[in-house]
Image (cartoon, rainbow, N blue to C red):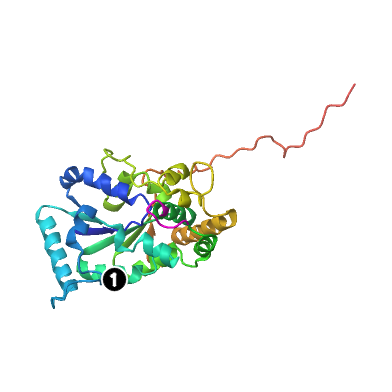
Amino acid sequence: MKVILHTGAHRCATTSFQEYMRQNAQGLAKFGIGFWGPFRTRGGLFHGIQPGPAPVTGRDLAQRAHGRLQIQIAGCRDQGADQLLVSEENMIGSIRCNLRLGDLYSGVGERMARFSQAFGSTVTDVALSIRSLDSYWTSALAYAVARSHRVPAAAQLERLAQAPRSWRDVITDIACAVPDVRLHVLPFEIFGARPEAQLTALTGAKAPRTHARVRLNASLCLQDLRAGLPPSVAARLPDGSGRWRPFNDAQTAQLREAYADDMMWLTGGADGIASLVQDPDKLAAGLNPPRIDLTRGRPDDKQRRMAGSG
């Protein structure tokens, strides 16, 4: 059975994709496609994979998590599933940790190595959604501020803009942590609003279009952010309406340049460790017809003289 780990990332329409899969789960099951989303993964399924506070019982929690996953995967296989898509963006980290460290999923290698050990040899594919860094950090900051995180100061914004780590580093860490699997990279700009295209690209199946335009957890605009914050905090946000743009022009250009470098690296083959998923609905340019019957426009090679006058 093909097991696909869909790791997000955060703020890349992952919640909308999960809702699309959940709404269509019964129909997809008829075609042999199973789905595990946050409703299942956050109910104790992944307990013990990552280190953390736990009762002292003398049990190996990581080993128990491995056994638990193998039992659940075997159950899906017995129910006739040919492909299992597991979507959980918290596998690679959290927005809170990214903002606290001012870095992009710095611990993704260790985290994915533990998930690789827990799933064992059943994983065949890993999918990662990426987004232009200026819009990613803007969306992450808007998400955090709406949940009582402090409004970023100029120094924090400059640190995010100057951070050397980019999606290329995240992809490389995942490839090292989960070797011998196919690593697919899906640009948010192409697949963010099209969950059915994501599903087709990852499974090869003809995806349903029902519930494909549900949009969840979208970033709040400035007026909505101010409305949900205490007046003292809302006063730190800029005036006006529309999308919040915390970075200045120079910082935005720097972040976009880093993302352009990542996309160029992916387009060039990503050193063989990952593949950039192309738009399945985009048709390749056709070949020009061969030019085999060429004729000259005017017989310029012929010698001609004007007739003399009179």
Q: Which residues are magenta?
A: 145-151
- In front here: 48 or 108? 48
The spot of residue 237 in percent (x, y) is 50, 50
Residue plotted at (15% across, 53% down)? 81
Residue plotted at (29% across, 62% down): 91
Q: Residue at 42% across / 67% down in the picture?
A: 101
The answer to which of 236 and 241 lies nearer the viewer is 236
Does residue 128 appear left or right of residue 4 in this picture?
right
Camera-nearest residue between 125 and 302: 125
Vertical side of 283 occupied by 179: above or below:
below
Q: Quadrant of the N terminus?
A: bottom left
Quadrant of the drawing holding the C terminus: top right
Which residue is situated farthest in the bottom direction here?
Answer: 58
SS at badge 1:
helix
Disc 1 marks a residue whose amino acid type is Ala
The quadrant in which residue 59 appears is: bottom left
The reply to whether residue 187 is visible in this rendering is no
Work out whether 51 lies above or below 279: below
Q: Is 22 covered by the magenta stretch?
A: no
Q: Residue at x 27, y 57 (%)?
A: 88
Q: Position of residue 196 (x, y in %)?
A: 30, 44
Residue identifier under label 1: 113
Relative to residue 131, is residue 122 drawn left or right? left
Q: Position of residue 96 (x, y in %)?
A: 37, 61
